[in-house]
Amino acid sequence: MFKKNKTWLVLMVLIGLSLAGDINAQIVKANKLVDEGNVINDKNRELIGKSRDLHVELFGDILAKVEDIKAYKEKNKSKFDELINLFGQVERLNAEITDKYEQASKLKVPEKYKEYVGIKIQEFKKRNVGYKLLISFIKEFLQTNDVDKINKLMVDLDKQATDIGKEAAKLSEKAGQIAKDNPQVIKIKN
């Protein structure tokens, strides 16, 4: 009887080690996916900076001084197209980042890790709502020459974009805190 118990004990230890090794392998894989998402995000930051600068150039103080809105839009048509393209690229890259995080969330990782990637998924999806909103705004702006309607579009955009930005920032902060509180589990390069 003693030999049987010893055999079972050895088997249990081996199973436990196997499971621990599997979980560690899953965490390593999840970290790799998150790191890949962060590399894409670094590229995205460059596009976001370019799009922000062009957006300010087209919709900043100069727009308030424009007397002929139709002529302004015609003169800057290529810049508006470029801005739509940039926001579209950012949106696509955000979708790629989200995909990496979603792949990581499907792995067998500790709950805190799942919580972290789940919040990051929400953050990038929220940011994409903002980029879709910006693209929609620019297209609608280009379709109308009614100054009152344009002003209303801009006020609505400002409020919605501000709200989306705040929500995304809160999600980012929350995920960052989870990563900071759980460095033994969430080992990502940032």
Image (spheres, rainbow, N blue to C red):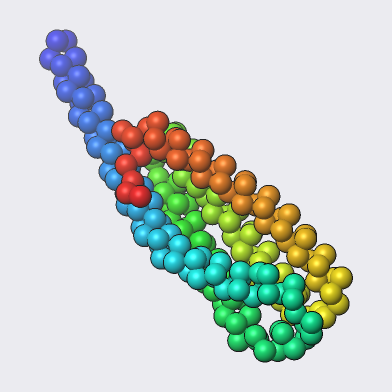
> At 81% across and 79% down in the image, what residue appears?
144
Looking at this rendering, what residue extends furthest in the top direction? Answer: 2
> At 33% across and 35% down in the image, what residue appears?
183
Looking at this rendering, what residue extends furthest in the front direction? Answer: 65
Identify whether 120 is placed above or below 82. Answer: above
> At 87% across and 70% down in the image, what residue appears?
148
Q: Nearer the viewer, residue 77 or 178?
A: 77
Can the viewer see residue 110 in this picture?
no
Identify whether 16 is placed above or below 149. Answer: above
**Quarter that holds the N terminus:** top left
Identify whether 114 is placed above or below 15. Answer: below
Quarter occupied by residue 110: top left
Q: Nearer the viewer, residue 126 or 76?
A: 76
99 relative to 34 in the view: left or right: right
Can the viewer see residue 13 in this picture?
yes
At which x and y percent is residue 73? 71, 84
Marker count (numbered): 0
At which x and y percent is residue 113? 42, 38
Q: Nearer the viewer, residue 115 or 75?
A: 75
At which x and y percent is residue 86? 54, 74
